[in-house]
Image (cartoon, rainbow, N blue to C red):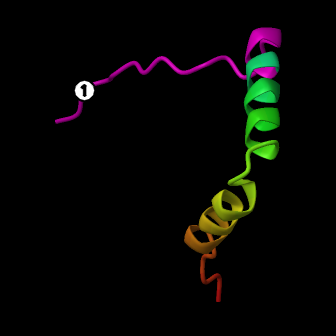
Amino acid sequence: GLRPIQIWVPDVRSKRFAAQAHRQSLAVANSPYEKDDQAFIDSISDWNTT
């Protein structure tokens, strides 16, 4: 059988979450490794949709 579980996740609607996400995005954007990081993300997220 199955049983219910509860998973706690960040509240993406909160101002605190938005502020933290903004701080993190600025840190990534200002990193000297930003281009390499983005290239890595692009390479692993290029899903074949056909």
The residue at the far front in this view is 32
Type of residue at label 1? Arg
Query: Which residue position is annotated with label 1?
Result: 3
Q: Residue at x 78, y 36 (%)?
A: 25
Magenta-drawn stretch contains 5: yes
Assign the N terminus to one quadrant of the image: top left
- Residue 49 place in picture, x, y as percent: 65, 82
Assign the C terminus to one quadrant of the image: bottom right
Residue 3: image quadrant is top left
Residue 16: image quadrant is top right
How many labels sit on residues?
A: 1
In what element is the residue under mark 1?
loop
In the image, taking residue 2 as reference, residue 15 lies left or right, namely right
Judge the density around disc 1: few (<14), some (14-19), many (≥20) Cα neighbours within 10 Å. Answer: few
In the image, taking residue 45 as reference, residue 25 lies left or right, namely right
Residue 39: image quadrant is bottom right
What type of secondary structure mainly makes up the magenta span? loop
Region in magenta: 1-18
> Does 1 appear above or below 15?
below
- Residue 31 place in picture, x, y as percent: 74, 44
Magenta-drawn stretch contains 42: no
- Residue 40 place in picture, x, y as percent: 60, 66
Q: Residue at x 74, y 62 (%)?
A: 35
> Does 29 appear above or below 37?
above
> Does 2 appear above or below 4?
below
Q: Residue at x 83, y 11 (%)?
A: 15
The residue at the far left in this view is 1
Q: Nearer the viewer, residue 31 or 5?
A: 31
Q: Residue at x 65, y 58 (%)?
A: 37
